[in-house]
Every structure is written in C-alpha cells, then in structure tokens.
Image (cartoon, helix red, strand yellow):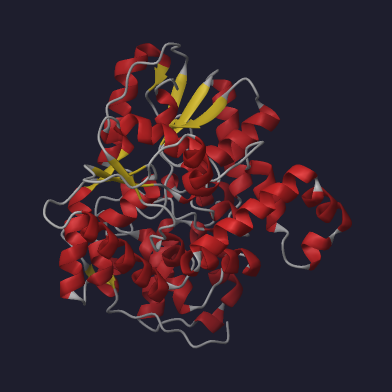
Amino acid sequence: MKRKITLSPASFVPGPQGPRALVQSVDYCTRCNACVQSCPSYLLQREEAFSPRGRNQIVRLLLERKIKVSDNPDLIKQTTAACLLCAQCTTACAGALPMPDHMLALRRAINLQTLPKTLRLFLRLHAVWPSGFEMLVRTGYVFRRLGLLWLLRVSGLLNLFGFAWLKHANAILPKRPSTLKKLFKKQKICLSPQEAQVVYLPSFEASYITPQTALQTWRLLQPKKTFVLTEQSTGLFEYLYGDKTLALIQLKNLLTRWEKLSPRKKLPLITDSIELYGFLKHSPVLFATLKGWQKRAQALAEHVQFVSDLRFAKPANVKRCALDSSTVLYPAGEAAVRARKIFKTHFGKNFVECEYSHYAIAAAGLAFVPQTRAEEMVLENVKDVARRQLQEVYCLSGLAALELNAALRRHYPQAQAKHMVFLQDEP
C-alpha cells in the first residue's frame, strides 16, 4: 500500500447514456440504499463499508482527496478485495451505476493483486503463449490422473511453492477434464471451415476444462458452418486482474482476427460465456480515447450473441430446475431474459422462475481471490437448492456451474449444476 494512489477521475466507465468519466459516474450515486440488500458480501459481512454504497463513497472520497489510502489501508484492501464484481448492485441501482468498474479502478490504483501470484502468472501465460499454456494444462491433467497432485498436496509442497490454489482447482474440476482441441480432433470436427457463416468464441473453461460445453454449442449452431476461435485470449482475465494494457492488446487481437474472418459481411460472434458476452458488449468503453478502435469495437459489440439467442429443442426429461445468472462486471440483462423465456417455455411449472438464491456464485475465477467469502456464498446456494428440492440448476457461466456443482457433489448430490447449453439433450 506504499504505492502512491493514481485513481484517475478522467478514466472512462460505462453508463446508461454511454461512457462517462469515473468522477461523474461516482457522483451519480444518490445513496438511496437500493443496492445494499442486493450485495452478497454485505449480506454476509453486515458492514456499511462492505456494501456497494459504502465502497462507492470510499472511491468518491479518494477522488476528492478527502481521505487517503494510508488512513486505513487494511479496510480499503479488505472491502475492495471482498467485492465479487457480480453487478447485482448495478441491476438494483436506478442509475445503473457500474460499481464493478469503480472497484476495478480502485484495485488498479492501490495496486491490489487479488489472485495468488502463481495463478496470475499462469493466466498471463495463456495470453502471451496459448500453445504453451495448453501443454501445461495437459501435463497437469496427467499428473492429476496419476495421483501426483495428491502427493504434492499431502507433502505440503503445493503451499511451499505458492500453488495452494491448486487445491481448490482440483476440487471443482470434473473427473476427467480435457481440452477443446483434443476433443474436437477426436470427433474429427473441422475448426476452420471455408466460407464460415458464424464465428464461435469458446470460454476459457470450455477451451481447457469442459470441452463438452464447446461441443454442445457447436452442435446447436449446426448446420451453419462454424469457425471456432481456438487459443484466443479476449483480455477479460487481464482486465479483471489488473493488467489493463495487456487486456487492450488482447482485445485488439480478437477484433483483428474477427474482422479478417468477415471482411465483407460481419459474421455473428457467438460465445458460451455470459462474462465474455458482457465484456465484449461493453468493450467500446475501453477505447473511449481511441476513436478508430472504438468504432471497430462497436461493430463487434453489435454482432456479439450469447447462446440464449440459439434455438433449443425441448429436453426429453423435464425436471424441477432453476436458472442461475451469476456473472461479473455487467448484468446478464437481455441474455438472461431470453434464457428465462426458453426455460419457462420448456419446463412450465417445473421451472423455478424466481431467483432461487440471494447470493451470486463466484465466476471468472473470483473464488480464487482471498477474502471474497465465495465458499460461504456457494453453500447458501446449495441450501436453497435443497430447500426448493431442485434437481438441476442451469448456469449462464461455465465457471459458476463448476463452483456450484462441486459444492452440490459434497453436500446435496441429488441435484446437479450444468451450463445452459446442456438444456438440450446430447445426441
């Protein structure tokens, strides 16, 4: 915390009427208290500083230089790290204040590294050397199957070398995880057909953990010729965990690659990640000072679609289910509305239309961030699943599905969490 604060009042954040300066966005807060009861971390902590309103006032006072980080560094660090960036406060706010963006600006200003160092370096490798990253992932899965990961954990070597986060990763991983390229090669599927009609951007988890999600999405897109963007970093993780410059570089690379695939007619860009969907929809804000790139990002944002835009067949076995729309940075919005309509049509009374829990599930790797109390929030979801006797919970986020399913396996195995694409039965 010795680093001098560099919270820029002029940095741009999203707003209902378009990008606006951080200082203006913060001042829009009327302190009406509508957001407080929507915040998962406040519901657990019950302290004003851990509410969206309290956090927003900390940012405002820092911008106005009425307080300094050095006045209470521990409190500022704890309340900033505890934010799940779930955007439930933005949904509840009448002015749609982008509180997650406010929190990210504060994290960067105080140089708060929320992820363990080794995990941060691991994710950075995905951005700068995708093929090497996949090689490491495959090697890790071999170690896991041979039981070597268990030996390292028991011996204490994981903690010694800063890999304690692998314990949680091992807990949420499916029994036999794989990678997208390996699965598609086994299925003899062409990832780059000529004259593609649609572009599919798999999420991180669909690329390296649950490739069945990518395969099911690909099937939903048939008979259209689908170009699958493999080994493509989007900049989302870099944006979330502090390196905004690298995030912009990765986003530019994605824009350039998409434009090359659709030089004449812009092709739809489909993603199975609600986090990626929101991030790309709001990407023009990141280029607010670069008008050329902003225009290109706007074109991409107009063509981004979530899987809830696809046509789903009615499943053969209709069970009592719920929909979880946990996400990060931005509310699921219209994508969640379309998803609810699909579920209500297919499941009728068996669909628990109301939100089954007040607690968001940590998505985009935020369960690896200390002080978020993410595990407690997931357990609250499990309690609600059991209370409502649900059999299936469909998630718009693949990582949220992994987190919830791991907790269900331990505490309530009668239910299962899945990604939304598995609403339609596999052939």
Q: Quadrant of residue 101?
A: bottom left
- Asked if one can make out residue 16 in the rendered structure from this viewpoint, the answer is no
Q: Is residue 196 left or right of residue 243?
A: left
Q: Nearer the viewer, residue 247 or 93?
A: 247
List x then y, in percent, for residue 15: 23, 60
Instruction: Decide: is 94 above or below 395.
Output: below
Q: Residue at x 53, y 19 (%)?
A: 391
Q: Nearer the viewer, residue 121 or 184?
A: 184
Q: Is residue 323 left or right of residue 142?
A: left
Q: Is residue 178 left or right of residue 269?
A: right
List x then y, in percent, for residue 63: 36, 79
Q: Is residue 29 left or right of residue 211?
A: left
Query: Which corner quadrant holds the C terminus?
Result: top left
- Asked if one can make out residue 415 in the rendered structure from this viewpoint, the answer is yes
Farthest-out residue, right: 155
Q: Nearer the viewer, residue 227 or 211?
A: 227
Instruction: Decide: is 361 above or below 105.
Output: above
Q: Residue at x 42, y 45 (%)?
A: 38
Query: Which corner quadrant holds the N terminus?
Result: bottom right
Q: How many marks?
A: 0
